[in-house]
Amino acid sequence: MRLNILTIYLKEMKEVLRDRKTLIFMVALPTLVVPVLMNIMIGFIVRAEKKAQTEILTFAIFGAEHLPDLANAFSEEKGFEKVNLLTQEAIASAIEENKIKFGLVIPQTAREQIERDEQVAVRFYYNNASATSKVKNRAGKVIREFSERYRSERLAGLGLDTPQEQEHLLNPITIEEHNTANMREVLGERVGGILPYMFIIFCFMGAMYPAIDLGAGEKERGTLETLLLAPIRRYQIVLGKFFVIFTTGVTAALLCLTSFGVMLAVKVQEITGELGEVIASVSVVDLVLIAAMLIPTAAMFAAVLLSVSIYAKSFKEASAYCGPLNFLAIVPAFIAMLPMVKLDWYWAMVPVTNISLAIKELIKGTMNYEMFIAILGSSVVIAGAFLFFCSRWFEREAVLFRQ
Amino acid sequence: MIEVDRISKTFRHRKRKGKAPHQKDKREDGKLFYAVRNVTFRAEAGTILGLLGPNGAGKTTLLRMLSTALKPSEGTARFDGVDVVERPLDVRRRIGFLSDNTGLYGRLTAREMIEYYGKLHGLEQAKIDKRMDELFSLLEMTAFADKRNESLSSGMKQKVSIARTLIHDPEVIIFDEPTTGLDVAAAEAILNFIESCKVKGKTVLFCTHHMHEVDRLCDFVVVLHKGRLCFEGSIEQMRSDTGQTHLDKAFLTLIDSSEVNHAA
């Protein structure tokens, strides 16, 4: 019996590994494309951030004569370049045309207000549409420092000479933060949702094409009927095919996980400080536990996809069914990315979502291991139930010889 | 020897709205549709039995039941006394089934594919190798045995299918329209091969639409029409019963008279 299953498994694997499309979905995409895309994305963000911090910010200032010290503060600061505009009304259009990055308008009464210890409102024009823009931060810093200088002088005039005395007056009560979440937990919460989502999607994608090929494809080519005439039981055919689809799904997911593991190992050498320590704290055991979670996931997908594929009469029909089936993987995995969804016993009972949430907890380093065992166990049971259904489904003449 | 004993196959048919009573198919019985109904015949060892019938007669369903792909709803069939319902796996070890629409695994070579079926039939590797050598020589396949099936011509593919059918040296061989889509030379090679099976004492069930092939190969024929058996006998008997010398016309006469009987 086992020999028959093994014979079918080895033959199907040989065919699968000779198929370019399967290799792309099973090996190339999860191994290469995702890390490459992530590297490109991270590189792009870092470059954009760096550019925003170092680029020369052109600006226009009106009313500089009313507060020359502030105008001088910008002149003395590196990274700022003054541009002359004819009128104040031209500021908005100049920003729009990218001639200047920001505009300042100092009121005529600024000097008198300063002398009377009043507050001066300096108008600041800028475009806040860009997510990576640092204009407000950089220009605001110069203005803040200028403002703090006056504030310090005023407080000294009140007899508060030391910075400590001034601080006590300005902030009688301060908040001393003691965050119980460590850095790994914080980072895990922020980025930990996307990783299980990707693992699950690759698990599904890696299994989908071979499932279509091994079920509907074999029906369409007319080879299924010859296989049914071999002196083997039908459940052996199902198991042989199931293990192939399971292998491709789990391989795709594990390759994705491995490439992330390798990326982390490389990055940990590049990144120093707390972030480096966080990455280093994701241990091999964590990765092994994540891999353990992906095994029943791949088994569930393999059984469902094979059932659907064997029902379809043709490759085209199977593809049409499997497309919408994608949502069965995407939606539950996506739910785990929502900020209000946390792993508790309720969510631990929702298939796929529980896997996704458990992987997120493992990345955060806050896994409840009782829950881990429950999720793993229930997923194995569900996968077994799907496989049993698939095996019975394969016995039905109306499915195999559907007209 | 093949013994088919009152075999029937029913399917639940879909309701078709607006169908007038006179349009009702005689094969419909309540919710059931009889694709094959109460068919009985036998074929002795070392003979070639032709299975004839127009499209939709139930030939494919009958062959699927005989090959154990489908389970009979009523009745049974036996191959050398082995029952298709009770011992389907043993039946599969005894039969080889070749159809025009059975495909090949495109990404495997001919050798890999035939070896695969040898293993599924439980043969030892040494026996598979010996049998492959025999078949490759017999079917003149050596030149393309290690090429992928997807790169082969129709004739070559049909030879691979024959080798796949015969790897376990079955006692009974079922051919379902084996020459469809083949050129003259390839079809001739197949027909010669079927003749050689008879010489070797194999029992052959040969299903075809080509009457010249029937005339050339078959010892006996059975004719199916609308799921029922409408003739069983020798070629000569088919001619004499219908009064037609040409087998094509004899066949059509049988079908016409069966149609009249159905209508009655």
Image (cartoon, rainbow, N blue to C red):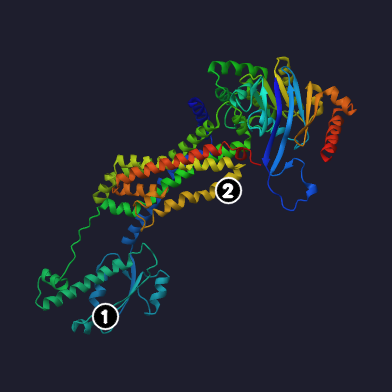
**Quadrant in which residue A66 is drawn:** bottom left
Nearer to me, B174 or B195: B174
**Quadrant in which residue A165 is drawn:** bottom left
Residue A180 seen in this snapshot:
yes
From the top left corner, tell me how far across and down residue B181 is, in percent: 73, 32
| Helix, strand or loop at mark 2 | helix
Q: Are marks 2 and 1 in contact (CB under 8 Å)?
A: no
Mark 2 or 1, which is nearer the eye? 2
Residue under the point 72% across and 42% down: B29
Q: Quadrant of the C terminus of chain A?
A: top right
The subunit letter for the residue under badge 2 reads A
- Asked whether, in this view, residue B254 is left or right of residue A184, the answer is right
> For the image shown, how many numbered marks are present on the structure?
2
Disc 2 from disc 1: Cα separation: 72 Å
Nearer to me, B105 or A303: A303
- Asked whether, in this view, residue A306 is left or right of residue B198, the answer is left
From the top left corner, tell me how far across and down residue A56 is, in percent: 33, 64
Residue at the disc numbered 1: A65
From the top left corner, tell me how far across and down residue A170 is, in percent: 16, 73
Residue A255 seen in this snapshot:
no
Earlier sequence position, callout 2 versus callout 1: 1
Label 2 neighbourhood size at 10 Å, few (<14), some (14-19), many (20+)? few
Q: Is residue A140 above or below residue A250?
A: below
The type of residue carrying mark 2 is Ala
The type of residue carrying mark 1 is Glu
**Quadrant in which residue A217 is drawn:** top right
Label 1 neighbourhood size at 10 Å, few (<14), some (14-19), many (20+)? some
Residue under the point 66% across and 34% down: B73
Residue at the disc numbered 2: A320
The subunit letter for the residue under badge 1 reads A
From the top left corner, tell me how far across and down residue B190 is, in percent: 72, 23
